[in-house]
Image (cartoon, rainbow, N blue to C red):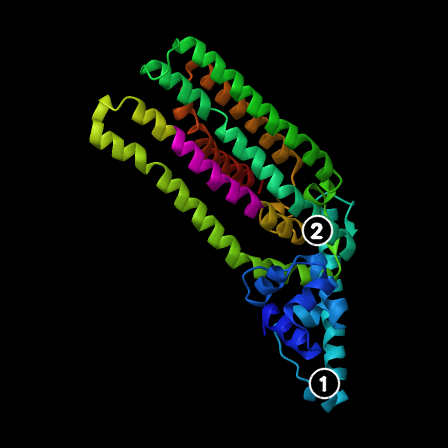
Amino acid sequence: MILADRIVELRKKKGWSQEELAEAAGVTRQSVSKWESAQSVPDLDKILKLAEIFGVTTDYLLKDEKTSEGRQEKNREEKKTEEKAEGNADLQQNREEKLSRDRARGAGRNDVRKVTMEEAKDFLRMREESASKIALGVSLCILSPVILILLAGGAEFGLINASEDKMGMLGTAILLAIVAVAVAIFIPQGIKLARYEYMEKGFIELDHQTKSTIRILKEDFEPEFSRKIMFGVFLCIVSVIPIFVLGVIFGEDDGFHFVAAVAVLLVVVSFAVNIFVKAGIRQGSYQILLEEGEYTREEKDKMLEIISTVYWLVITAIYLAYSFLTFEWHISWVIWPVAGVIYAIVREIYKAVKK
């Protein structure tokens, strides 16, 4: 039984409507409807609230196993068996935690920090709140050259009665203003998330229940994550179609049409990246808590962190220098995907050499 079915079952057992459950949980009826149709997954805070409302454990809500009322009353033998099994699971968890600490010590790290359910809940909530704002800031950075491109192109092809230099200066001023807004978004979000830096860069340890809850939340989110990534990739592919079509129709004499197509490309890509960032931050939150993906203990390497920081600072400097010197913003964005591929190669080479 999946979480959505469990919520429906428990709500009906209480004889509540979706509106009544929404009021008790402090959410909208639409949120409850999405939970019950498996269109979205409640965050950790809401799962704890639902468990309290229904008078059940979070394990009961999240585990994919059905226990009917008759079975609960039927015998206590099963309960004893389950308790014994849970005891064995806890023992196994303790072994895993001990092994985890031993690995940390072997890596020269003795600062393994325990993370409680409350800390994990606050971390996920904070990351969820920041995701939309960070995604907006990234989208603004991608959109920042659009007005510059349109103004300079309009002046070049006679659609704006002003010199190309003046329009270029005006467009650059607007670009810098948009980037300044993006930076103003990034800074407070970075300060808010800095309190959880120890989770991302240090060694952490979750108790068995917290780890199980986070793992199930991650598994429930993965289908939604895949859909969002696929849609974002689709948008990126679609964004270049106008440029190819105009190239075929007008050839080299497509004039302002090409400029407009580049502007459209950046707008569409900004939407795609917005989706990538929000989905990636949520997925990354689960990976940080579970120490998976890019956040395994092997990946939490100080030298790799230094290499990464220096690398991306250099790439940013190259991007800005090339773009401002040539004003070829419609081409310079290619630096980022190329840099991403090169970074992945460099990181794998570093890890292979270190081994």
> Foreground residue, 153 or 312?
153
Q: Is residue 262 left or right of residue 291?
A: left
- Say what secondary structure mark 1 lies in: helix
- Amino acid carrying label 1: it is Gln
Q: Residue at x 66, y 57 (%)?
A: 43
Residue 201 visible, this orientation: yes
Q: Residue at x 44, y 50 (%)?
A: 230
The 10 Å Cα crowd at callout 1, few under 14, some 14 to 19, many 20 or more, is few
- In the image, the segment drawn in magenta is 263-280
**Position above or below: 265 against 314:** below
Task: Write down the quadrant of residue 16 in the picture.
Answer: bottom right
**Position above or below: 13 against 322:** below
The 10 Å Cα crowd at callout 2, few under 14, some 14 to 19, many 20 or more, is some
Quadrant in the picture for the N terminus: bottom right
Q: Which residue is mark 2?
A: 103
- Amino acid carrying label 2: it is Arg
Q: Which residue is mark 1?
A: 72
Type of secondary structure dominating the magenta stretch:
helix
Q: First in sequence: mark 1 or mark 2?
A: 1
Q: Residue at x 34, y 30 (%)?
A: 261
